[in-house]
């Protein structure tokens, strides 16, 4: 017997990640309000580059759960906005490494503060033990499907 505790119609809401969408919308609204000309998609790429600058486009695909065409288009747009620059790998010219620009580095502190505030708002009334259970369950779901 399947371990499916959802009524019809609930599963779609679960899969689409209503909470994730709500957080992303709030974060985008806060970025706009702070005058940061940055989309959530761009911020997710910058976030991974702030953790490790100079990673390949494929590594960005893996880190952000996006496909190659999406990352290529996103990096193209970010290059036009002078947020990142592509540098061919010295060891393999087929690989582009993505580096932050000074402009993107300047966005880190403000955007991370806004992201932390947004997440704190989202989790404000959630008990810590429930957050731990949620993280554990979502990790299991992810592991089951990867």
Image: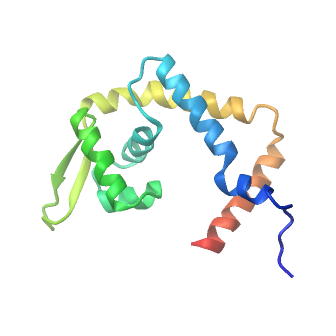
Residue lying farthest to the front in this orientation:
9
Q: Nearer the viewer, residue 145 or 51?
A: 145
> Where 67 falls versus 27 (above or below)?
below
| Coloring applied to the structure | rainbow
Q: Is residue 80 left or right of residue 28?
A: left
Identify the residue at image location x=28%, y=28%: 103
Q: Is residue 63 left or right of residue 138?
A: left
Pinpoint residue 105: horizontal percent, then vertical percent: 33, 32
> Where 119 falls versus 13 (above or below)?
above
Identify the residue at image location x=43%, y=61%: 62
Quadrant where the C terminus sits is bottom right
Q: Nearer the viewer, residue 51 or 120?
A: 120
Q: Nearer the viewer, residue 120 or 66?
A: 66
Pinpoint residue 84: horizontal percent, then vertical percent: 26, 40
Count the numbered circles shown.
0
Pinpoint residue 17: horizontal percent, then vertical percent: 66, 50
Q: Is residue 48 left or right of residue 123?
A: left
Which picture quadrant has residue 142? bottom right
Identify the residue at image location x=39%, y=59%: 61
Which picture quadrant has residue 46? top left
Pinpoint residue 111: horizontal percent, then vertical percent: 47, 28
Q: Is residue 12 left or right of residue 55?
A: right
Quadrant where the N terminus sits is bottom right
């Amino acid at each position: 017997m399947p371990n499916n505790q959802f009524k019809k119609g609930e599963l779609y809401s679960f899969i689409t990640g209503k909470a994730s969408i709500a957080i992303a919308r709030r974060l985008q609204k806060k970025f706009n309000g702070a005058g940061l000309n940055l989309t959530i998609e761009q911020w997710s790429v910058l976030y991974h580059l702030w953790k490790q600058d100079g990673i390949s486009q494929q590594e960005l695909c893996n880190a952000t759960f996006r496909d190659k065409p999406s990352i290529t288009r996103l990096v193209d747009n970010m290059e036009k906005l002078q947020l990142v620059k592509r540098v061919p790998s010295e060891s393999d010219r087929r690989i582009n490494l993505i580096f932050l620009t000074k402009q993107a580095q300047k966005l880190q502190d403000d955007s991370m503060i806004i992201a932390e505030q947004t997440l704190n708002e989202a989790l404000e009334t959630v008990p810590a033990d429930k957050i731990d259970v949620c993280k554990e369950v979502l990790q299991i779901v992810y592991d089951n499907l990867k």
